[in-house]
Amino acid sequence: MKKGLFLIVALALGTLSCKVAHQHASGWVPVFDGKSLDGWKVGENASTFSVEDGTIIAHGNTAHLFYVGPVKDHNFKNFEFKADVMTEPGSNSGIYFHTQYQESGWPEKGYEVQVNNSHTDWRRTGSLYAVQDVKEVYVKDNEWYTESFSVQGKRVIIKINDKVVVDYTEPDNVNRPEDMKGRVISSGTFALQGHDPNSKVHFKNIMVKSLD
C-alpha cells in the first residue's frame, strides 16, 4: 500500500474509532452494526427486512424485527433511544419498546412509537400509538429525520428532530381496554415494524443509552 493511501486509511480508521469511543463514553451504544441483522430476530415474513447501504429496510408483508442482541441483554427499562428514519410516500411503520419477541402478529406487549407521514392512518410520526396521538406532520417523506424517545419511570418523551411532540406520563393503575392490555410501562426490547407491502421505511444509526 502506498504511503499516502495508508495515511488516509489510518486517519479514517482513527476518526471512526474516536467516534465510537465518544459514543460509548456518552453512554450511547449502537444496536445495529450497519451491515447485517446480527442481534435482531424476525419470525413470520422475515423477508420483509433487509440491509442495504447501511440501513435496515422494512418493505413487505406485516412483520416485526426484534432486537435480541447483547446490549443490556436486550432488556431495557429506563433508557433513551434514537434512530434516523426515512419514509417513502404512503408508508407506515413503528418502533416498539418494552416489548418481547413474537413469531407473528402485532406485538401485544409494550408501546409503539409511530412512523407515518402520509399513510391513510391519521396517527402521524411521533405518536405514542393509540395512547397519545399526533395529528401534525413534522417531517417529509424521502427525507432523513431523527426519531428519539426516552422512558424514565412512567414518563415517555418522544422527539422528532429534537422537538418534543409527546410528553406522556402513564397513570398509576392504568386501565387499558382488553385489546391494549399490554400497553403498559414495564421493561423489554425494541422492535421495528414492517406494516404492509406498500410501505417502505429505512432505519439507520440505531442507538440506545441505558438510564438504569
Image (cartoon, rainbow, N blue to C red):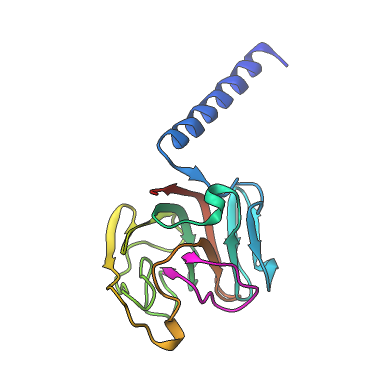
Give the image quarter of residue 68: bottom right
Q: Nearer the viewer, residue 28 or 7?
A: 28
User: Does the segment drawn in magenta span residue 96?
Assistant: yes
Percent x, y for residue 3? Answer: 66, 11
Left or right, 42 with respect to 22, comes to right
Residue 96 visible in the current orientation: no
Please give the name of the residue rendered at 33% of the width and 68% of the height, measured from the top-left corner: 137
Please give the name of the residue rendered at 39% of the width and 72% of the height, measured from the top-left corner: 184
Percent x, y for residue 181? Answer: 43, 81
Q: Quadrant of the N terminus?
A: top right
User: Does the segment drawn in magenta span residue 78?
Assistant: no
Please give the name of the residue rendered at 57% of the width and 49% of the height, measured from the top-left corner: 32
Q: How many marks?
A: 0
Percent x, y for residue 43? Answer: 67, 70
Q: Which residue occupies the extreme top position in the image?
A: 3
Percent x, y for residue 21? Answer: 49, 30
Left or right, 42 with respect to 135, comes to right
Q: Nearer the viewer, residue 207 or 86?
A: 207
Magenta stretch in the rendered image? 95-116
